[in-house]
Image (spheres, rainbow, N blue to C red):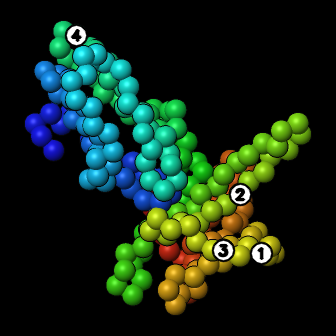
Amino acid sequence: MSGDLVGVWEVALSDGVHRIEFEHGTTTGKRVISVDGKEVIRRDWMFKLVGKETFVVGTTDAKATINIDAVSGFAYEYTLEINGKSLKKYMENRSKVTSTWLLNLDGIDCRVVLEINRYSTKGLLQKKDTMDIWCNGQKMETAGEFVDDGTETHFTLGDHDCCVKAVSSGKRRDGIIHLLMVDGTEVAEISE
């Protein structure tokens, strides 16, 4: 990266935390976007210094847009949108539909993410939820089952039996809570 670095963002997606860097040369018109250290866009000699650049991030192909706006004179403001929402709004919404756990298994750091996708079926007043579990950027093979106090989604990490339990919180406002169990031991959830 050169001296034209004007923005750095850390974006947590289901497949991992991605670092987005943006260079904007206001004298040369240069725009360079790197994701996780790899250059994804390079434009030289752009005569229009404001505008937007759109690209994808991660294996989930999240749509990212960097907006470049003039504030005053030769001062610029840079904002990042993910899937059409400001980064702040995206992360607020994401925290409602994901749970994340960090753990170390057999000397390997693991980032486990439960992602709940909500869909409305066209033409019907019906909603459908699907659950995906990711570990270190890989979507896991899972097997779900209904149990007396909710559901359990089973998967393995190496030689370890894992399970995400969905149970009632007992409070209407909090709804369903998700617990990660590894070899029968609960792992504490983190906030991203």
Q: Is residue 56 left or right of residue 99?
A: left
Q: Is residue 169 visible?
A: no
Residue 56: x and y in percent read 45, 44
Contact, mark 4 vs mark 1 (Cβ under 8 Å): no
Horizontal side of residue 63 vs 36, given as left or right: right
- Badge 3 element: loop
Judging by the rendered image, the residue that carries numbered circle 3 is 142
Q: Along the polypeptide, which appears first: circle 4 or circle 1?
A: 4
Residue 145 numbered mark, or none: 1
Measuring from the top left, give residue 51's x and y in whole percent: 36, 20
**Could you tell which of marks 3 and 2 lies nearer the N-terminus?**
2
Q: Amino acid at mark 2?
A: Thr
Which element type, helix, strand or loop, lies under badge 1?
strand
- Residue 25 on image: x %, y %: 17, 27
Indicate whether 133 appears above or below 160. above
On residue 126, the disc is none
- Mark 4 and mark 1: Cα distance apart in space: 58 Å
Does the residue at mark 3 contact the one at mark 2 (Cβ under 8 Å)? no
Q: Nearer the viewer, mark 1 or mark 2?
A: 2
Q: Amino acid at mark 1?
A: Glu
Crowd class of label 3 (few under 14; some 14 to 19; many from 20; radius 10 Å): some
- The reply to whether discs 1 and 2 touch (Cβ–Cβ < 8 Å) is no
